[in-house]
Image: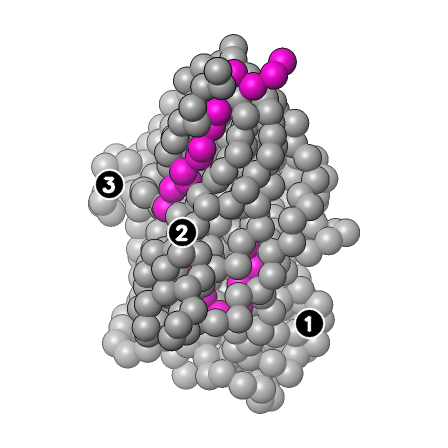
Amino acid sequence: MRSPARPRTVPPPVGGWDTLNALADMPVQNAVILDNWFPSTDKVTLRKGYTSHATGMSGDVETLLAYTPATGTGVLFAANGGNIFDVTAAGAVGAAVVSGKSNGRWQQTQITSPGGHFLFAVNGTDTPQTYDGSAWADSTITGPTIANLIWANNHQRRLWFGEKDSLTAYYLAVNSIAGAATAFPLGGLASLGGYIMAMGTWSRDSGAGADDAAVFLTSEGEAVVYAGTDPASAATWSLVGVFRIGKPIGRRCMIKLGADLVIVTQDGFVAASQILLADRSQAETVAISQQINKAVNDAVQAGSSLFGWQPFIYPKGTMLLFNIPDSSVEAEQFVFNTITRAPCRFTGINAACWALLNDAPYFGGQADGTVYKFDDGFADNNEAIAADALQAFNDFGSPGANKRFTLVEPIFQSNGAPSVALNLNVDYQVRRATAVASTAAETSAKWGISKWGIGLWGSASQTYRGWRGIRGIGRSASLRVRISSSVNQPSWLATNWLITPGGPL
């Protein structure tokens, strides 16, 4: 007598994308593929899209510079070629506010002085630029060869900066934006040589204060760390240590995440609080990106020298995003939920740079001279968003027994009926997806028509479910779930399976 079919319920892949664990050893809440599905604590949700914000430029938009005033709304600028444009307002850009520069790859920081709030930007070739809330001007710093300044940081109310290909840092007086800079050489400490790639501030006690550490990161992967307030006084400035980590990737390799400092390295994405307390041989075990470090390493090997690597925080979306450039195809993003640390991958977003203005995320497009607003609407500039997930293989509690898989019921929450394509994979065989996910055409269920078993009048978020036939025999199984949508944002809540034990061997 054939055994009766048994129902099983599996949570969605809230554990995130996983390239660390073997297919046979992967937690069931993780995923072999998780593209454009963003994991949260209880569901995975199709990411939102982006809309065209500022047009009229040509080529790559390589830098977005956000200025935050003391009161009121901020201002956003885009660097495109040798020009800088005001792109705060949506629509076609006007005349450039800065022109005639050698490149558009600016590093920036903001500092407050008695004269007001200033944005300070350097690109390693041209005279540094300052913006005071109304106009741009050439910097009047003296000391270094200022056209060679390539990195900048605001640390302990002092503006720090450095020349390209140099192990000497410079700083100004407290709350100053101009004047004579004092040299601070690090050549005697950086035993591996190279040059200072970037500088960041690490708040070791979860709040800004006198013990905030200055982290100078060299191109060879040495972190020179100082603590204190006045680098001219031995009583208030001291060396914490010199630490070896992976080589940093790109000039925009560091970002503050709360009190911590996140660094993009060839060993993965690491937090200062973890990597500076561990030996480099342990880098992978303490990396934020541990679960997807294979994918990170592959991306580094393929394009570590490319422009466009950048970490980016989007607090409102609980996202820590890493922009990954690619020379042959469009850029992609490795994205982490800042609450759960679960990772996923975003595709279809061909970004060269990112910035946050008034809590909204923007990115500069590659090759098309456009600034886009992200997390805006349900489509990628009127194109459907395609999501793909292959959940971890599951033996359903009986690893040694064959099973017949006959029916599956994914459960979604959405403001419109989702159009879903399903494929069954058995026994750790990852097959090419064959089912086609068509774009959902309705934002709400129609009167008298029930999609996925439930139809409600109106467009409020509702639950969609319905059994679908599948065919497969094996000891373990994984469901591939793909959605293409330009009109709604489905969330995957769970999956019900109907399984018959003891299928033929």
* Residue bearing the label numbered 3: 206
Look at label 1 and name its amino acid.
Answer: Asp
| Residue 109, quarter of the rendered image | bottom left
Residue 266 percent coordinates (x, y)? 60, 33
Q: Looking at the rendered structure, which numbered label has been put on residue 113? A: none
Look at label 2 and name its amino acid.
Answer: Arg
* Residue bearing the label numbered 2: 465
Quarter of the picture holding the C terminus: top right
Q: Is residue 490 magenta?
A: yes
| Residue 71, quarter of the rendered image | bottom left
Look at label 3 and name its amino acid.
Answer: Ser
- Return the residue found at the far right: 328
Residue at horizontal 65 percent and vertical 54 percent from the top: 436
> Left of 157 or right of it: where is 450?
right
| Residue 115, quarter of the rendered image | bottom left
**Of marks 3 and 1, the one in the foreground:** 1
Residue at horizontal 60 percent and vertical 25 percent from the top: 473
* Residue bearing the label numbered 1: 368
Q: CA distance from mark 3 to mark 2?
A: 45 Å
- Return the residue found at the far bottom: 94
Residue at horizontal 60 percent and vertical 69 percent from the top: 383
Which segment did they paint magenta?
483-505
Circle nearer the N terminus (2, 1): 1
Q: Secondary structure at mark 1?
A: loop
Residue 183 percent coordinates (x, y)? 48, 47
Q: Is residue 243 magenta?
A: no
Residue 121 percent coordinates (x, y)? 51, 64
